Amino acid sequence: MSEAATEPVKLPENKQPALRVMPMPADLNPSGDVFGGWIMAMVDIAGAIPAHRRARCRTATVAVNSFVFKQPVSVGDLVSFYAEVVSVGRTSITVDVEVYAERDPENPVVVKVTEATLTYVALDDKGRKRPVPPA
């Protein structure tokens, strides 16, 4: 982890989180940190929300284009997932997700813990690709 990754930041002021969750003890890996797979699942859920809204139909994840864990997440952190559509293709929607952890309620600090880019595909009622409607 780079030193920049551990410096406190502010939550995005002009955006609402797609998802906000507090991990529980069952979400820990053997090292005592929140399991990376749990974070990946929450990122996928958070990214699917704006993809679904933009597609106005069922969507499915087709690619995880990038995924960077900047620092661990702990039980008791309030984890906020900010998701934004960054491109729309004929049948696909690409979403950037930034993840922040709010720590230590007595001396609050916010750190960016993860960032990812995922691509979703719009699906019809039979599970086949379909065009994304115009905005």
Image: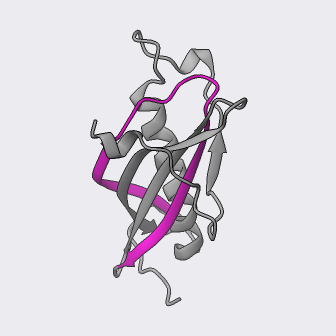
In the orientation shown, which residue stands out farthest toward the bottom? Answer: 134
Q: Report the residue at 59% width, 47% height from top.
A: 80
Q: Residue 80 in magenta? A: yes
Colour convention: one colour
In the rendered image, residue 99, in percent from the top left (x then y), is placed at: 49, 48
- Is residue 50 toward the left or the right of residue 130 in the image? right
Query: Which secondary structure dominates the residues rendered in magenta?
Result: strand
Image vertical order of residue 31 relative to residue 46, above or below? above
Image vertical order of residue 103 relative to residue 65, above or below? above
Name the image quarter holding the N terminus: top left
Q: Residue 135 in magenta? A: no
In the rendered image, residue 100, in percent from the top left (x then y), is placed at: 52, 46
In the rendered image, residue 73, in percent from the top left (x then y), is placed at: 49, 30
| Front residue of this view, candidates 61 and 36 | 36
Q: Which residues are magenta?
A: 59-88
Q: Is residue 20 visible?
A: yes
Image vertical order of residue 95 relative to residue 1, above or below? below
In the rendered image, residue 4, in percent from the top left (x then y), is placed at: 34, 46
| Front residue of this view, candidates 96 and 127 | 96
In the orientation shown, which residue stands out farthest toward the right? Answer: 106
Q: How many marks?
A: 0
Q: Which image quadrant is residue 20 in?
A: top right
Q: Report the residue at 66% width, 63% height from top.
A: 16
Q: Report the residue at 41% width, 9% height from top.
A: 30
Q: Which image quadrant is residue 76 in?
A: top right
- Is residue 84 toward the left or the right of residue 88 in the image? right
- Is residue 92 toward the left or the right of residue 77 in the image? left
| Front residue of this view, candidates 13 and 67 | 13
Q: Is residue 125 visible?
A: no
